Image (cartoon, grey):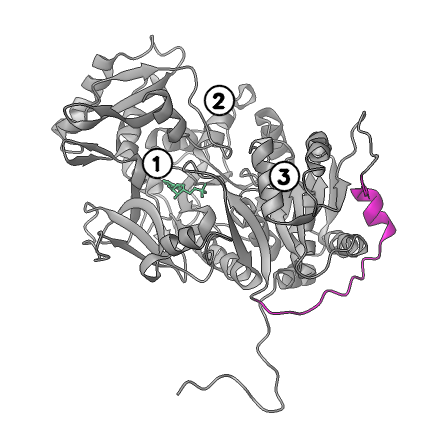
């Protein structure tokens, strides 16, 4: 029989609580800086005091254990304060997706039963409009007062609230399985669903991500001395959990406010940022910003996830000195599951970071774009429809299913969807993947983005990867369109690259892909028989390609 840990006269196991992530940085790096837009900076001691003051202020507004406190802000030091203060009180932090429609924001605030809303002045008008329809919402606190905003009906202004309060809030100890955060999956596939994460899950996720990012032998790694700036919004899966990792490590942290490419690049230079993470669209936006022209970005490490990173984009970034690697996860998984790293290095590089002038070979670029290797504690399988494991040959595809200590227990208030998510005891990602003998996983497609042509599967991601290598292509999305004869056929929707000798034609793209047919990379039936040229591709609220919108457009 299992013997539980119970030593008479001793102490029970210490619960894993989010607040405990602050212990080491406060002991070791108390003078390290937190910077907001280059306009405000303070140290970790002040961070800790402000967390206490925020908790005292929230308690005065009636926030208690279990209360939901929602935040609508751009990436800021205040968001970081809320990441700690709210869960440390035993309350639940709801991060509101700023890019949802007003109706969806209302629906999610209502569903989460938010009682207090901390809101940036940019969204105050919306918050005031929604308030009358949200009977549970008792208080609104405005984060950054702006000219012309009428504070009537607002419980107060954030800085004034903190200034009045004591930093000595008595944060309680409680069960590590208490809910710490909640937010809504943005879904390219339906209406938002609520996921939530416990203290234990957030702490273990932080340690798992740290283990994966800090340990690589070659290339990118995150460690003491790095300067961190998130470039995935803090409302989206806790900015991939990396503010918690950066805090635990005691790094200097730089919060950029509302994303603006030129301001981000200026901040990076001024604050000497060395580590960020973003979706491919943001990386592309930064590389093509006017102020990025002729800039050497050496020393900047960026984890690229949320969508596949094409080798064309990775090459562009590496040529400018940015050390890029892919990573993978989803809202339901807190989010990290896979992070990429080099298991070996070919060529002249040493065991440490790559020197700026050391050219990266094509093989290494391809390896950096593989989706990744599992994080510590992640159990992953790639299975067929009967849950049998597919061979680890780098070719056979199946659905990626996972277990890990930090996956959402389900969708709150939706037992049917939760049961589907967790069918057969594994979380179903609905992503189609292969795994090679070395353990690298490659996401081939979302299940619903695969194209079934004449009974054979075509990977839209693989076609996008190959088409993106054409010099006339700036961006591309491949979707399935109905076809009388074949069921479905691939359609390539292309944003042409300006100044590349005119937009590509279908013949150009076909000739370009023919070499990959000849090399056996793709079958002939995967060649698109139609392309569409567009000025821009539709994006989801977190900057990913919105294939649902594209499919509707070209139905
Ligand atoms: P979300 O829950 O909005 O963060 O979206 C999660 C989904 O994004 C996953 O299920 C994948 O389909 C996709 N995704 C995330 N990272 C990657 C990646 N590195 N490569 C390909 N697809 C990715």
Is 422 above or below relative to 301?
A: below
- The segment highlighted magenta reads 154-176
In this view, the residue in front, 129 or 150, is 129
Quadrant of residue 500 within the rendered picture: top left
Q: Quadrant of the C terminus?
A: top left
Q: Which residue is mark 3?
A: 75
Quarter of the image where ligand 1 sits: top left
Instruction: Determine contact: label 1, label 3, CB under 8 Å.
Output: no
Looking at the image, tell me whether mark 3 or mark 2 is earlier in sequence order: 3
Query: Does residue 446 appear in the picture of this structure?
Result: no
Q: Which residue lies most toward the right here?
A: 164
Q: Which residue is mark 2?
A: 288
Q: Which residue is mark 1?
A: 360
The CA span between labels 3 and 2 is 22 Å
Q: Is residue 445 magenta?
A: no
Q: Is residue 28 left or right of residue 278?
A: right
Q: Position of residue 239 (x, y in %)?
A: 55, 44
Is 463 above or below relative to 347?
A: above
């Amino acid at each position: 029989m299992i013997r539980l840990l119970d030593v008479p006269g001793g102490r029970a196991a210490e619960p894993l609580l989010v607040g405990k992530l602050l212990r080491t940085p406060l002991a070791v790096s108390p003078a390290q800086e937190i910077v907001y837009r280059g306009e405000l900076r303070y140290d970790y001691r002040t961070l800790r005091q402000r967390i206490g003051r925020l908790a005292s202020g929230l308690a005065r507004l009636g926030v208690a254990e279990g209360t939901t406190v929602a935040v609508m802000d751009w990436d800021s030091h205040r968001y970081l304060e809320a990441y700690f203060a709210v869960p440390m009180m035993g309350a639940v932090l709801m991060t509101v997706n700023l890019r949802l429609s007003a109706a969806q924001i209302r629906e999610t605030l209502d569903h989460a039963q938010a009682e207090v809303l901390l809101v940036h002045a940019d969204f105050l008008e919306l918050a005031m409009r929604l308030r009358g329809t949200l009977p549970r919402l008792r208080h609104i606190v405005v984060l950054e007062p702006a000219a012309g905003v009428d504070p009537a009906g607002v419980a107060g202004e954030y800085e004034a609230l903190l200034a009045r309060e004591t930093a000595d809030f008595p944060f309680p100890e409680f069960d590590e399985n208490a809910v710490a955060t909640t937010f809504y999956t943005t879904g390219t596939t339906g209406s938002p669903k609520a996921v939530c994460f416990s203290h234990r899950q957030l702490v273990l996720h932080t340690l798992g991500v740290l283990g994966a990012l800090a340990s690589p032998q070659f290339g990118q790694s995150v460690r003491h001395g790095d300067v961190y700036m998130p470039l995935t919004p803090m409302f989206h899966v806790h900015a991939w959990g990396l503010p918690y990792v950066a805090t635990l490590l005691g790094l200097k942290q730089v919060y950029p406010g509302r994303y603006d490419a030129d301001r981000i690049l200026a901040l990076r230079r001024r604050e000497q940022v060395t580590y960020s993470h973003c979706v491919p669209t943001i990386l592309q936006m930064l590389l093509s910003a006017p102020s990025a022209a002729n800039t050497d970005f050496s020393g900047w490490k960026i984890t690229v996830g949320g969508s596949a990173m094409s080798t064309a984009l990775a090459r562009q970034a590496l040529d400018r000195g940015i050390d890029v690697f892919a990573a993978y996860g989803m809202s339901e998984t807190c989010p990290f599951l896979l992070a990429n790293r080099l298991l070996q290095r070919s060529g002249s590089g040493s065991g440490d970071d790559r020197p700026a002038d050391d050219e990266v070979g094509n093989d290494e670029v391809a390896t950096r774009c593989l989706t990744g290797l599992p994080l510590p504690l992640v159990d992953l399988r790639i299975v067929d429809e009967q849950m049998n494991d597919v061979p680890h040959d780098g070719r056979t595809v199946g659905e990626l299913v996972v277990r890990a200590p930090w996956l959402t227990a389900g969708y709150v208030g939706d037992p049917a969807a939760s049961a589907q998510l967790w069918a057969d005891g594994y979380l179903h990602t609905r992503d189609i993947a292969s795994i090679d003998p070395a353990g690298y996983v490659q996401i081939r497609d979302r299940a619903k983005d695969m194209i079934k042509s004449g009974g054979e599967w075509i990977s839209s991601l693989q076609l996008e990867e190959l088409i993106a290598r054409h010099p006339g292509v700036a961006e591309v999305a491949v979707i399935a369109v109905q076809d009388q004869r074949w069921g479905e056929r691939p359609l390539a929707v292309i944003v042409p690259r300006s100044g590349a000798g005119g937009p590509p034609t279908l013949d150009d793209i076909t000739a370009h892909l023919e070499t990959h047919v000849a090399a056996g990379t793709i079958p002939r039936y995967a060649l698109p028989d139609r392309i569409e040229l567009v000025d821009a591709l539709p994006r989801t609220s977190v900057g990913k390609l919105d294939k649902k919108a594209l499919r509707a457009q070209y139905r």
